Amino acid sequence: MTASAHSFGALHQQPEPLLLINIWDPASALLAQQQGAKALGTSSAALAWSLGYADGQQLPVAELLAAVQRILRVIQLPFTVDIEQGYSDDPTQVAQLVVQLAELGVAGINIEDGTAEPQLLCAKLRACRALLEGRALFINARTDVYLAQLVAEADAVTECIRRLELYKEAGADGAFVPCLTDLAVAKQLSQHSSLPLNLMGWPEGATVEDLTETGVKRISAGPALFLRSYQAYLQAVLSFLQQSPLTDLPLNYADLNHLFS
C-alpha cells in the first residue's frame, strides 16, 4: 500500500505529465492496464453512473467502497479514487472514509472544494493527515475556481494560487484545476505552486511537449472515456435493434474473458 502510494507520487515528478486513465469498473481497469497505463483513477461521474446513481455526491459510501474493492482485486497499478467533497461536510467523517480507502490499498484520492469556502477543504485535509498518522497517500486537491466560475475571470488566477497554497499547507500533494485550458495560465500556476498540476482533458492543440514546458504533471480524462464508451454502446444497440449483426468486433469474448483469468 505504502509502496503503491510512493510510486504513484513519483509519477508526478517526471518531466512529462502522467496520463491518468479514468476507469469505473474492473473491465475498464483491466483494459487500460493491458494497454500500458501507468496509473488508474476513477471518475466520480463514471463510477456513479455505472452503479446507477447521478454524479454529485449521490453515490452511497458503501457502494463506493465495494466498487473500489472489486477494482483493486484485479489490478496491479497505482489506483486513485475521486471522492468528490468527501461525501460529508464533517472533516472527521471525510478522514474516516479516506483511511478506509487507504486500508483497502488505494494510492491516492481526489477531493474538491466545490462552491464552499476553501477553509472547509483545508479542515478536511488536515483531518485526513491526522487520521492517516503518517501513512503515505497522494491527496490531489481539486479547486473548482474555473469549473464553477467561483470568481470573476480577471481574478481566477490569483484565487487559484491562493487556494492551492492553502491546500498545500493543509496537506495536499497535488493540485487539480478542471476546466483550465489556457496553457499560459497553467504555467503561471506551476510557477507559483510547488504542487504538481493536474488538468482535465487536453487543451486544444496542445502536445505533450507543450504541457511539459508548461509544467503540467498530470492529465486525466474525467468522464470522457465513459461517455465515449457508452456512445459506442448506444450505436451498437441501435444497430442491433435495426437487425444488423454485431460481428467482426475488435474486442472479442475470449480476449476479454482472458483478462480475468
Image: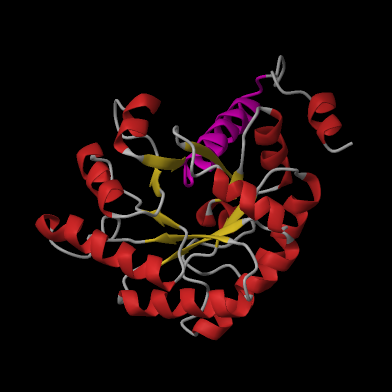
Where residue 103 appears, as percent x and y from the top left, is: 73, 67
Residue at 72% over, 38% down: 30
- Between 96 and 232, the one lying in front of the other is 96
Visible residue check, residue 24: no
Left or right placement of residue 39 versus residue 220 in this view: right
Residue 87: x and y, percent?
53, 74
Is 193 displayed left or right of 61 in the figure? left
Residue range highlighted in magenta? 220-244
Residue 144 shows in this picture:
yes
Residue at the image position 61 percent from the left and 29 percent from the top: 236
Identify the main secondary structure in magenta: helix
Name the image quarter holding the N terminus. bottom right
- Which residue is farthest right? 261
Magenta-drawn stretch contains 237: yes
- As rendered, which of 131 and 147 lies closer to the eye? 131
Q: State the image quarter where residue 195 is shown.
A: bottom left
Could you tell whether 177 is left or right of 136 in the image? Answer: left
**Horizontal and vertical percent for residue 172?**
45, 64
Identify the image quadrant of the C terminus: top right
Question: In percent of the image, x 65 and y 20: which residue is there?
Answer: 244
